[in-house]
Amino acid sequence: MQLDIDEGRNGTATEAAFHLSEVDGVMTCELSGDWTTHTVGEVDREFRQLESREGFSALHLDLSGIRYIDTAGAWLIARMIQRQEKQGTKVEISRQSEAASILLSAVAETADNPDVPEDASRRFNPLGVFEAVGRGVFLLRSDIIYGLHILGATVGGAQMKLGGKQSINPNAIVSQIDRMGVKAIPIVVLMSAIVGAIIAQQGAFQLRYFGAEIFVVDMVGILVLRELGVLLTAIMIAGRSGSAITAEIGTMKMREEVDALTVIGLNPLGVLVFPRLVALVIALPCLTIIANFAALGGAILVSWTYSDITPAAFIERMRTAIDLTSIFAGLIKAPFMAMIIGIIASVEGMKVGGSAESLGERVTASVVKAIFIVIVLDGFFAIFYAQIDF
Amino acid sequence: MSTDNDMPQQGGARDEVILEVRDVVVRFGKNTILDHLNLDVRRGEILGFVGASGAGKSVLLRTVLGLIPRVGGTIRMFGQDLATVSDADRVKIDMRQGVLFQHGALFSGLTVLENIQVPMREYLNLPKKLMDELALLKLELVGLPRNAAHKFPSELSGGMIKRAALARALSLDPDIVFLDEPTSGLDPIGAAEFDELVAQMRDTMGLTVYMVTHDLDSLLSVCDRIAVLGNKKILVEGTVEEMMASEEAWVKAYFRGKRARTIVQPGPPTEKMYGN
């Protein structure tokens, strides 16, 4: 059996059309063609004009020319009837098909009140700016409080909601360390090595003017160990693991899995956030150490090629240039940054609403906020270290 | 213009086969889900599709919709073979079918009104105001209140999501709608209303309905024909009476089991019996 796909409705559909003629104050409107969702768009404007037209006492709609009609076509006709009758015109329909009369009665109820309700939330509000600022401030406050809750819950451990059994699951922590730490090693090593090499190269070129190329070791050593190693790693982890935490918790929130945990009697913070936060606090310092090695390695290689500083000379010089405080000044920051990344990611994850869009928004917010706060924190540490002469 | 007599029958002939499934085979790996399955859906009928959980009802639906590839067989829709159809014709077929997924599958970032307008926006060039009105019309046709228009799917109840999804499926006044368990998760009264709604759509718009369901009430009250999927093909196909007479074990258990008897033969007489 071969039916024509174009039959009636689509390709070979004839256009909707209407023809007006006025005799003795009676307006006759003959409708013809297909009046379907696909075709009525063309006549909608003209038909709407006729709706508000005055100057005739009766309107006669002749539907005999209509080939196909669906709800959209019936809607236009019903709307016409409603509007014209409201103006006091007598409206009469004639020669409609059976389908048309069924459809007309089906859409009549909606046509009695054809105006689409206004969306209150989209109405222009001149005070909207203030409202948005106010909302933002309160949201910030609740974010901070929620973040502190998470911190508190983490210090308290992964307990049941009512206290009692301490159910820290080492497997969860280990698997999170694997995902957030071990699997991040290649990218962290690569990135740090390249940055270390670039700094060494640029530093060497500048210091060459003073004949002090060997001081590139001091510069790279201090810069990498105190600042760059930990900062770059934290930024990479914020992008890599912070987004993952937000997406995971957010999706669980969307599918009511978080609610299920609560109802079962588990503390969602303990079950979901705690292992991730602990894993981050362990993984980020470890990654920082690896990043430091990689950056120094890159620097050694570049110094050797561009400035003929042999690795042995580089390491010899480094011994005098840096001491343990340089290393710890950087490393101490790592757990704090891990905390911030984890908490922000969890708070944003818990804020995911019902829509896919909100998930995307929250993941973006999580990464942006985490990177921003990590950099600000790094600045505060720098000021702090300067004050205590560390 | 033509006279009344030679005007084409709106919606085409009643017996015309809209969807023709022939020898369809679907496999996941080595696991055969559908084995040489045949099925016809005729214009203007409500076909109820039942089968045990995991029998492959959803797989067949998704195969017909082209979401799952098939190993063999042909599926013809509106007379076009879906395997060889051109992209342009495929779009035309898409415009003539509507789908209500089991969980609604409303776009979570759009309001109900915008959800209903998605197919219109995509395929047609309609003025914004008319689209709003038509979406509102569809909204009321499926029995949703006006104030639901600007709500997001996350703010709707389960029943409202189903209705909104049906409104989206009906957005372009399709010829055929596929409903995947439309009444699951609805209360019995809501489910009965939904069934009535579907029957009403069939009567007013000449809609063809392919309904996967487990709801005996809907099967008995609105379905013109029932097909039972089992053993990787259609076990039985026919009216409610034919189902009652079938000796197939699963069909017997389903339609003449203890649970069914209480619905089919209730103690005090009720109005709702074999709708057709």
Image: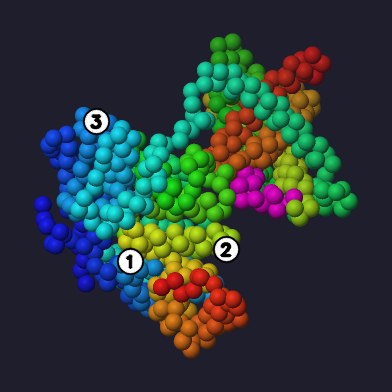
Q: Which residue is mark 2?
A: B188
- In the rendered image, the residue lying farthest to the bottom is B247
Q: Chain of mark 2?
A: B
Mark 1 surroundings: few (<14), some (14-19) or many (≥20) residues within 10 A: many
Mark 3 surroundings: few (<14), some (14-19) or many (≥20) residues within 10 A: few
Q: Chain of mark 1?
A: B
Element at label 3: loop
Q: State the image coordinates of residue B219 (x, y, percent, origin top left).
A: 48, 71
In the rendered view, tell whether residue A217 sits above or below residue B161. Answer: above
Residue at horizontal 38 percent and vertical 77 percent from the top: B37
Between A195 and A307, which is closer to the camera in this rendering? A195
Q: Which residue is mark 1?
A: B44
A346 sits left or right of B30 in the view: right
Mark 2 surroundings: few (<14), some (14-19) or many (≥20) residues within 10 A: few
Magenta-colored stretch includes residue A167: no
Element at label 2: helix
How far apart marks 1 and 3 lie (CA) works out to 39 Å
Q: Are marks 1 and 3 on the same chain?
A: no
Q: Which residues are magenta?
A: A244-262
User: Mostly what secondary structure, the magenta segment?
Assistant: helix
Q: Are marks 3 and 2 on the same chain?
A: no
Q: Chain of mark 3?
A: A
Q: Which mark is residue A53?
A: 3
Amino acid bearing label 3: Arg
